[in-house]
Image: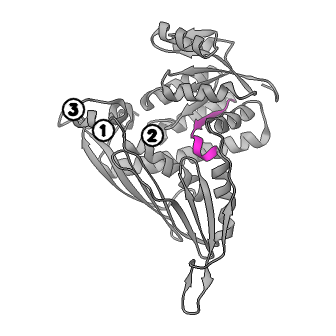
Amino acid sequence: MTQGQKVRIATIGTSGIAQRFLDALAGYEGATYAGAYSRDLGRARAFSSEHGGTLAFDSLDELCACPDADAVYISSPNAVHASQALACVRAGKHVLVEKAFASNAREAKRVFDAAAEQGVVAMEAMRSIHTPGFRAVVEALPQLGEVRLAQMGFAKVTSRISRLRAGERLNVFDPRLAGGSLMDIGIYCVEPAMALFERPSTVSASLVTTQVPGEPADSPYRKVDLAGAILLGYGDKVVTLSFGKVSDDLAPCQVEGERATLIYQDITKPHDLRVVELVDRGMTWGTVGGNERTVAVENPENDMVCELADFCEAVNGDAVAIEHANMWADVTLASLEVMDEARAQAGIRFPADDEA
């Protein structure tokens, strides 16, 4: 494709997140909606028509072969992200895959390698690291001096926890679908950490787990995580991540350097950034009474437009956007490597972990 050309995007998945993505697409001039895929053709037709699309598929092969779609946004269950993305990529389609990009790092690498071979863009729809707020976090880091500690948390009670407690099997808490709190919500902590600090030298995880309803006691997929914490060691710094779907985290994020501390709200959409400088008090240093600067940030109401714009610019061949897409691919891989290790330490397995 050439710069300035509208990217024709089809969707896989008809959930609420797909609808939110299409709301963002409707207000973005660089792309247009082509149509929907669903295993239920009637549902695909209804979803496509509702959002202004003209195409509908109940066959992934037909979508992949369609010349009227340049790219595919994938928001199906985590466990099928990689196989669907791989099919699209091998057919010459660009793919924007909802987080988590794949069940594990091995699956993700397979998709990225295929995309490189085909000369198409494969990118994770990890909205938070594409926002103006996150760019402001990145730009503030040099003001902090040597970073020594960071704390990033995101926990939010799910309305579905009572159904899980009652014995209902839910997709989001199903290891057979690559579910769990880490993959669903902890990823919002892991990916910014990888984007800011890259791969750690050590990973130490402690996860709160429960039995999966209906899964046999001797099944390798019998456990799923509800919450947890991960300690990332870098030698020169330590980063603490906490997450969960059974409690609410009200604390801000902090990045602590030797010259200043950065504080900001909401890791999923960073805002209210403050940089507080340390002051010399003789025998001690402290931030109390230190010079404090606020950083103005304006995130769009539907911040999925940020990832959409970055994706479409890369698809259209913008050199800087392609460089950024390659950088984000490495962030995705590094994040999945950390999450793979965290799950391994907690004894949580997905079917993809047992595939060659």
Task: Name the residue type under label 1.
Answer: Ile
Please provide percent x and percent y for residue 185. Answer: 44, 44
199 magenta-colored = no
Which quadrant of the figure has residue 4? top right
C-alpha span from label 1 to label 2: 25 Å
Could you classify mark 3 by the number of other residues whose Cα lies within 10 Å: few (under 14), some (14-19), or many (20 or more)? few
Farthest residue, direction front = 289
Please provide percent x and percent y for residue 110. Answer: 53, 34
Farthest residue, direction top = 42
Query: Mark 1 or mark 3: which is in front?
Result: 1
316 sits left or right of 256 in the view: right
Query: Mark 3 or mark 2: which is in front?
Result: 3
C-alpha span from label 3 to label 2: 27 Å
Please provide percent x and percent y for residue 288. Answer: 56, 78
Which quadrant of the figure has residue 172? top left
- Decide: marks 3, 2 in contact (CB < 8 A)? no
Q: Which region shows up in magenta?
A: 120-130
Could you classify mark 1 by the number of other residues whose Cα lies within 10 Å: few (under 14), some (14-19), or many (20 or more)? some
Q: Residue at x 38, y 38 (%)?
A: 353
Task: Name the residue type under label 3.
Answer: Gly
Residue picked out by circle 2: 104
Whether residue 169 is situated above or below residue 191 in the rendered picture? above
Residue picked out by circle 1: 161
